[in-house]
Image (cartoon, helix red, strand yellow):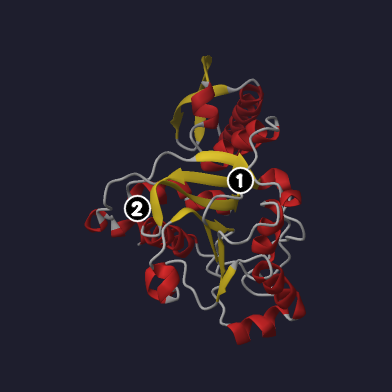
Amino acid sequence: MGARERANAKKKKKQIAKKQILKVRKHEKLPAQSIGQLPILDKDEHFSKSRRRGDCPDVVAAQNRKKLSNNEDNVCTYGANQKILVVGDGDFGFSAGLVSHCKGKGSNIVATSYDKAKELTEKYGERATRHIQAIESKGGAVAHGVDATELKQTLPKKLSQKKFDCVVFNFPHTGKQRVHLNRKLLLDFFISAKQMVQPGGEIRCTLKNKPPYSGWEIRKQADVAGNLGPAVEKRFDFSLFKGYRHMTTEPDAKKFDAFEKHCVTYCFVVSNNEPIISDIDVSLFV
């Protein structure tokens, strides 16, 4: 057999093998082994469900979205008698809606923003002013320049001594699309928020349950922070908080397509034990 014939035979063999791959993949057969670049297929070996889907965070997130959307009772709500600290509230739209959600009782609500008062006005204008007035007119407290990762240090002294039933952080984001930075933001928030919650209280964090947010591994960050119970997932319903819409960290950033079906509030109960900060694995963020 000449060189040309050998080349043609090899080419034909590859074409046949590729057809075989496509045919078997269509029926979810598993490649058993490979020689060179082309696999030899075992038609009697199938993909198991776990091999096909695995524990991929994005697949799990999609499954959870379906479960939540099918359970209309599993919605994140708050009670008028709960002492609530809201952090990172942009234009204070959520906190204003929360006052309305709590039947107009704002005396148990402390609303905070990362921005200082002047920066807030420059970013959000009169909208933020209206929201602040709505909170304060019902007895709520408002504070600016509060860092969710250093609550004890940045809250006004009087507020920093209080203990809350619930600390809330909706749609946390560093402002950069860097997974490791946003994971660290979550971890630092959990460590900080635990100091502000009385035993048996909750830390609640709302995220979109789809990439890239599902890749931040919120449960893992809570586990590393320690002394937090397993996450209870609840569907976040914007309509329960009158006038609220998500604000990005930068007003000129790409519009956030916050469809309700993708938004989940993760609720973590704080235990009685003191946190062990020294056990944190910093390699998570390398």
Q: Which mark is residue 245?
A: none
Tell me the residue at 66%/52% (across/down). 102
Q: Is 33 situated above or below 155? A: above
Q: Amino acid at mark 2?
A: Ala
Q: Are marks 2 and 1 in contact (CB under 8 Å)?
A: no
Residue 249 shows in this picture:
yes
Q: In what quadrant of the picture does the C terminus appear?
A: bottom left
Q: Which residue is mark 2?
A: 225
Count of numbered badges drawn on the protein: 2
Crowding near the residue tagged with mark 2, few <14, some 14–19, many ≥20 C-alpha atoms within 10 Å: many
Going from N to C along the chain, the mark reached first, 2 or 1, is: 2
Q: In what quadrant of the picture does the N terminus appear?
A: top right
**Secondary element type, mark 1:** strand
| Image-based side of 35 in relation to 209, left or right | left
**Secondary element type, mark 2:** helix
Tell me the residue at 30%/60% (across/down). 282
Q: Where residue 222 sits in the image (x, y, percent)?
A: 40, 49
Q: Where residue 173 sits in the image (x, y, percent)?
A: 55, 64
Tell me the residue at 59%/33% (across/down). 14
Q: Which residue is mark 1?
A: 264
| Image-based side of 63 in relation to 278, left or right | right
Q: Is 176 situated above or below 108? A: below
Question: Which residue is at the front of the view, 217 or 193?
Answer: 193
Tell me the residue at 41%/69% (across/down). 160
Cα gap from disc 2 to disc 1, whole angstroms: 20 Å
Q: Where residue 92 sits in the image (x, y, percent)?
A: 65, 68
Q: Amino acid at mark 1?
A: Val
Residue that protrudes farthest toward the left in the picture: 278
Q: Where residue 103 sits in the image (x, y, percent)?
A: 70, 52
Q: Is 16 situated above or below 213? A: above
Q: Which of the 4 image quadrants contains residue 250?
A: bottom right
Q: Which of the 4 image quadrants contains residue 18?
A: top right
